[in-house]
Amino acid sequence: MMEITLQSPLDMHIHFRQDEMLKVVAPLSAQHFAGGVIMPNLLPPVDNLDRLHWYTSEVQQACVGHTFDPYMTLFFRDYTAQDLELAKPHIIGIKLYPAGATTNSDGGVQEIMSMAHVFDAMQELDIPLLVHGETHGFVMDREDEFCEVYRALATRWPRLRITMEHITTQKAVGLLDEFENLRATVTPHHLIITLDDLAGGMLQPHLFCKPIAKRPEDRDALLQAALSAHPKLMLGSDSAPHPRDKKECPGCAAGVFTAPIILPMLAELFERHNALANLQAFVSDNAQRLYKLTPPAKTITLSKTAMMIPELYGSVVPMWAGRELSWSVTAIS
Ligand code: NCD
Ligand code: ZN
């Protein structure tokens, strides 16, 4: 039977939430991954050391019994250099949200360039900056417009390591080769779907997320970069659970929940394109190098054995609920 083993896969962008939701979703990532970057957009956000310590311990408790390193983040705000120095040992980076760009980002940044002193300090301390890169423009143009901000940040702070989170456009892929200090995550769903899958036929709320899925040429550029294991591109699922009643309603919340199916989806996709040999780099090696990480040892075996995607995990409907995937995780050690 066709099989592939992956060493210490990492999910470099995950929403774990808190309370009951955390208990449902965290184990689903912790079973398949050796580590992951945990997003700080709770209400209120994780934006001080006390809250960071509290959230870290909540996450650790939710992952008990699994070999999984949670890489914690702080929510970007006007931190002092001393705040950052104290936080540095406990975080992998700081996540910047433009105010109002997505779920729970109302406390985000209004005027990015007014935060120059924070970027100065982050660069000096070598703390990575993780960015939700969307302007407040027309929804299909938000990421392309934000590329100007990425250029400005990358040029003015050449030693600041900047991750363009969940990129969705051909233009953002191009920036990877233009600036040494820019790197990116991409989600499995943005490698597969376009706006047509979301809204071209009957509306599919479980495929609605920010940034919104774009054009075929964007999807193709992302896919090409992932399949060829572009050295500056990492898996970051942006798995973002919302209860079913917040998705299947007027005012559908943004977020696609993929945590339990990420690796099978990717195995199926990479196999279809004869690129299974590049999956290891995409799901772990690139992230280890770019973030200088040594995750715990963990071997995940995937086999070409079909799995049916459940209709629900707790109150959350996963992407492609009820569909079959041709690959599944068959051993974890
Ligand atoms: C995320 C969420 O629900 O927290 N939603 C999303 O559509 N991706 C926030 C985010 O990463 O933008
Ligand atoms: Zn996210």
Image (cartoon, grey):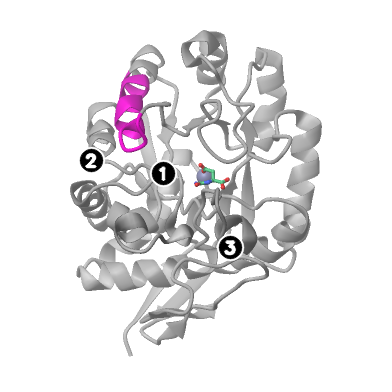
For badge 3, the amino acid type reads Ser
Quarter of the image with the C terminus is bottom right
Q: In the image, residue 184 lies at what x, y percent?
A: 37, 40
Quarter assignment of residue 159: top left
Measure the C-alpha gap from mark 1 to mark 3.
Answer: 18 Å
Is residue 142 visible in the rendered image? The answer is yes
- Of mark 1 and mark 3, the one earlier in the sequence is 3
Residue segment shown in magenta? 138-151
* Front position in the image: 311 or 278: 311
Estimate how packed mark 1 is, as few (under 14), some (14 to 19) or many (20 or more) residues with alpha carbons within 10 Å: many
Q: How many marks?
A: 3
Q: Secondary structure at mark 2?
A: helix
Write down the residue under mark 1.
166
Q: In the image, residue 244 lies at what x, y percent?
A: 61, 63
Write down the residue under mark 3.
29
Is residue 115 positioned above or below 173 on the image?
Answer: above
Write down the residue under mark 2.
170
